[in-house]
Amino acid sequence: MNYTKWMTISVCLFIGFSFTTKAQLSCGTTPSPLEKVELKSLLQYNTKNLRRTNYNLAVNAVVVHSDTALAAFGSSEIEILLNRANLYFADLGIQFILKDDKIKDVYNSKFQTFKSIDELALRNEHDVLDAINIYFVKSITNKDGSTLNGYSALPTYKSGSNSVILSYQNNSAENFQILKDKTFLHELGHYFGLLHTFQDGNNTDITKRELVTRGTNANCVYTGDEICDTPADPFEKLSSFNNINCSQPFPEDLVDANGQAYLPVFDNLMSYHVGCGDNFTQQQYERMEAALAIRLSPNAEYQITSQETYFVSLKTPKQKVYCVGENVSLEMTTSGTFENDNYYTLEFSDQTGDNFHDVEATFFQDSLHFTIPEALVTGLNYRFRLKTSSPEVSSFPTQNIQIKGKGQISLSTNKSITNIGDFIYLNVNTVGGGPWSFELSDGRKFTNINVPELAIATQINETSTFSLKTAERACGLSMDSTQLTIEVVPPAISIASSFVTDICKKSIVKIPARGLNIDKIATYNIILNGENKSYIVKPTISTTSVNFMVPDEVEEGETFDLKIDGESLGDYSETFKVKVFEAPSQPKIISPIRYCFNSPATSLTAEGDSLRWFFAENDGIPYPSITPKTAEEGIFYYYVSQVSANGCGSERSKIEVQIKPPVTANLSGAAVIVTGDSTKLRFDLTGEAPWNLEMADGTVLTAKSETFEYYVKPYNSTEYILKKVNNPCGNGFVSGSAEIQVILPLGLNPEIPKSLIAFPVPAKDYLDLRFEENTNESAPMEFYSFTGHLQMKQTLLFQNGLTRIKLPELNPGSYILKLTRGTETYYKTIVVR
């Protein structure tokens, strides 16, 4: 069988294959606008025989295997698939049966790993005209290299549309479950005219995207999948949400053109969700029922069921939306020879698409005319059906149409009195579906409005009147032309003309203002309204001004309308136009600066233009110059900024000034020492090292730390006096003295006789004494510490001028030995170790 013309097909792709992880279905192509028009045109002819409730549709099941391996897919799987489909399509009176009660096995490795470019070759060899051609291959590769799960064509009369091609992959349990529960039914849905639930969900023309609402402004009849009981599906806008858990709420920040959050269902067979349920909606069944007129039509090049003797069809209206009172023209066709007494009756459903009833219509040879009643309830799912009397035959119902009633439009406001420059909202309220077009009395025009209420922000600068000037809507309307007057209250707060409207980035702005309500100081705000951004800043208020900090986000060159705003009507100021300028850079400084205590100082300096000096970081009073005071020691800080030509002050630079402590020296260290000992003098100093010290006796010392010690060893009592101190800062102040008293221990005569010898030196446990002359005599001995404390006393016996003393336990040190010999007394210094 040869095919010379093919419809563009809708293809479906599996990116993942795990049923438990909700593998993602993805169709490779979607119907073009031309295909949708052709499908709509074909759906205009649909018939149904009232005497017949079931249609046995033959299936030509072609299974392609490798020519070198055993079959991996066969009759048992196809039987399961057809039984599954029969459960879903029983509501349409459809029964799928296997042609000749057998499958067709094809052993061809090339076609088993199928490429879409080889479709014509495969189908020319194995297609039939008396059944639905369903091919099962191991894998499908699209022209772009992507792997497809399967594809089918939308219904047309051409035999090229009579096919479905599916991939059984490796026929694992989980792959077959997805094929059975989702893919096979999904592709049959396409075969009978269903579109994806997300059709045109991301169309570049926003008017072609389906809205969430199902109210009077719904567009579900002619956008998306053109079915209103399937919620708008944003899959193409956020395809990653196929990974959302089936019970997980949908992201609230994904909204339609009206700002309504999407609430798609995950369990529809025509969505791209796998494992979240499996159903067709009532209106999807109705659309497939209308598509049966194409698949079962005598005009089709293929016949998938036995033909009817009598066939009547009704062409669906060209419009998808009609107004009450509007005339509908319908075309009809018949097949077969009807009786002479045959007559036609038009049936019309209610807004649910059911409960057909006879309506009055005017019939001509190939057409009829029907006027939609004025009192008809508006709805989204009205359908027509045509029946004959001899014999009794009924057409399939048409696709659904939307009926709109007459609309009403009015204007209201949220405020009737306001402050000058404030915004109010003009609310345009509509009853009945859109789209609406209207013009306000101030000349503003609005078109293609599909929301029941539109709030229009309007700035009021003077007492103004607003009304609806004109309004248009396809199904007629009544317009309320009432005029709304918005009054303005003059400002109670005045800003002095001296206010400088050039303000600086990140600076404090002072607004000289009068008329503030003293009881409501905390309620005031500074309003900065810019072209792209606005700010509300909380100010601080003094007796003479309202002060605020320019927000950090404000950029150079921006302009704002500035005003002081309270919470009551009239409690606001007039608006000033202010412009933001860049502040200059901080002045360049040298820091720290050091001064000697009480030394002359010069004015501080910095590198910059129009310098302003401050004693504190947030000091508001500038000075032309500052000279540090040096009469107090410590670290002090001063601040300087520079001012640009437009008056903007820079951030302040911080200068550290160090005043060194005054130079002083205090001498201390009075002590009493024994002749031959030394002692230390202590100097306590302030100021900066090094210090030069000059004593009264002419001694010159240098100190490098604030506490300086100097050892002296006078032989006589002496008073040490500090005469002068100086350091790099100059001469300082001296104070204090140190009187050192030198004493002889126990009246010791400095002249010790050399005729008495003591050894060893130093002594420890004993001490030997010897006179130069060899005498035998006794002599009293006393042993003292240097502080005059008696340590031992005894009479020594000399033999041949020599004697030994056993020493008691003594601390190491120097001791005085006193020996009396007749009228002479001998003193000897003894060192004990």
Image (tube, grey):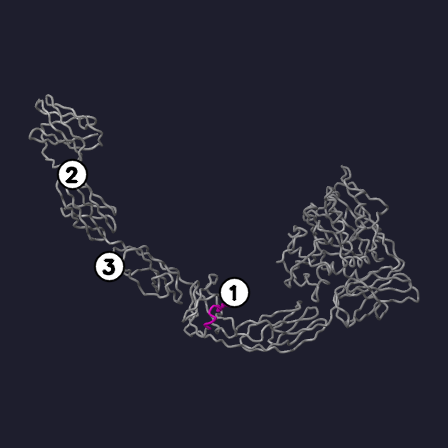
**Magenta extent:** 517-536
Q: Which amino acid does label 1 sit on?
A: Lys
Q: Which of 724 and 534 is in front in this view?
A: 724
Q: In this view, does 465 lie above or below 116?
A: below
**Residue located beneath label 1 in the image:** 533
Mark 1 touches mark 2? (CB < 8 Å): no
Image quarter of residue 33: bottom right
Residue 547 visible from this viewpoint: yes
Residue 145 visible from this viewpoint: no
1 or 3: mark nearer the eye:
3
**Residue located beneath label 2 in the image:** 674
In the picture, the quarter occupied by the C terminus is top left
Residue 565 - label? none
Q: Which amino acid does label 3 sit on?
A: Pro
Which percent across, then down, holds residue 75? 81, 43
Element type at marker 2? strand
Which percent across, then down, holds residue 704? 24, 46
Image point 64% across, 76% down: which residue? 469
Residue 600 - label? 3
Image quarter of residue 109: top right
